[in-house]
Image (spheres, grey):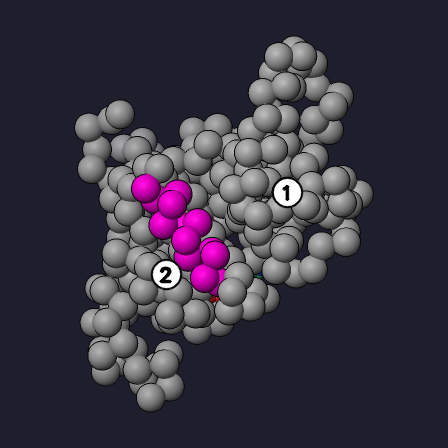
Amino acid sequence: MSGHTEILSLRSVGHSFGGFSVLKNVNFSVPHGSIVGLIGPNGSGKTTLFNVISGYIRHQHGLVAYDGHNMQAESIQARSSAGLVRTFQTPKVFEQMTVLENIMAGACKLTRSGVIEDIFSLPRSRADMRRIFELAEEACLKFGMEKLRHDLALRLPAGQRRVLEIARAVIGRPRLLMLDEPSSGLNTNEIASLRRWIEQLRAEGIAILLVSHDMELMTVADCVHVLYFGEIIASGGMDEIQKNTQVREVYLGA
Ligand SMILES: Nc1ncnc2c1ncn2[C@@H]1O[C@H](COP(=O)(O)OP(=O)(O)O)[C@@H](O)[C@H]1O
Ligand SMILES: [Mg+2]
């Protein structure tokens, strides 16, 4: 355990695409073991910020510190090995692999291109593979996918693909789990399960950075930041945010 109170710290983070400034002076932190929310209208820069933090984009300004270390020079794989794990707004599942195999892939390192290497072609000991298999079986149970575990991922409906992606992320033992719109495409019951899992993961000591348009789900967060055209315009508990006049005007449409 490090001496830092924050697992993630963003200081004056800025990024432009072709001269168009998408992130401007973004400052916030994720304390160890906390749930931090990020909301904002479409196009406000939430996914770009996830790409910056996880290393898919080299940002131009400011500091991204993970567990007290400047991440600027670190690759996607190095960040993921250090426990900085994210999911994607559009779930990335391996359609021709089973649910169980998809989850097992989460225990293996990502390649530079972001494509996971064929887990069965890697030289691993039988004991390693057995352990990964057991962890994947556990994850299937934990996320309610035990009946689907031998089905090909291509058969899964949208909601289950999201759950599969989260299960795969969690098997990689994250210390900071970043979820990009995990509730989109989920029905009310599935969102209720998602909320329970998020709370359970936090209880296990995993810090979570959550992006969602579901305001009810966002009440799970200890603190929520509102991103608007690349700038944080408000921060606080969801009840505070919902009362904020500027936020109501620009985002909640009230
Ligand atoms: N790779 C890219 N190249 C150019 N513009 C991009 C790229 N990725 C995102 N953008 C632009 O950045 C802005 C923020 O997008 P995004 O981060 O996806 O927002 P959000 O996730 O909040 O909906 C949008 O205007 C989008 O068109
Ligand atoms: Mg997005």
What residue does disc 2 label?
38
Asked if the magenta segment contains residue 206, the reply would be no
Instruction: Name the element at disc 2.
Output: strand
Screen quadrant of the N terminus: top left
Circle 1: residue type: Glu
Provide the residue span drawn in magenta.
191-203
Q: Position of residue 248 (x, y in %)?
A: 30, 82
Q: Badge 1: how crowded within 10 Å, few (<14), some, or many (20+)?
A: some
Front residue of this view, candidates 194 and 96: 194
For marks 2 and 1, the one nearer the N-term is: 2
Q: Quadrant of residue 102?
A: top right
**Residue 187, label in figure:** none
Q: Is residue 195 visible?
A: yes
Name the residue furthest front: 147
Q: Residue at x 22, y 79 (%)?
A: 243
Quadrant for the C terminus, please: bottom left
Judging depth in this view, the residue of 202 and 123 nearest the camera is 202
Q: Please name the amino acid that badge 2 sits on.
A: Leu
- Is residue 11 shown left or right of residue 128? left
Find the residue positioned furthest to the right.
96
* Residue drawn at x 69%, y 41% as measured from the top left: 149
The answer to which of 89 and 100 lies nearer the viewer is 100
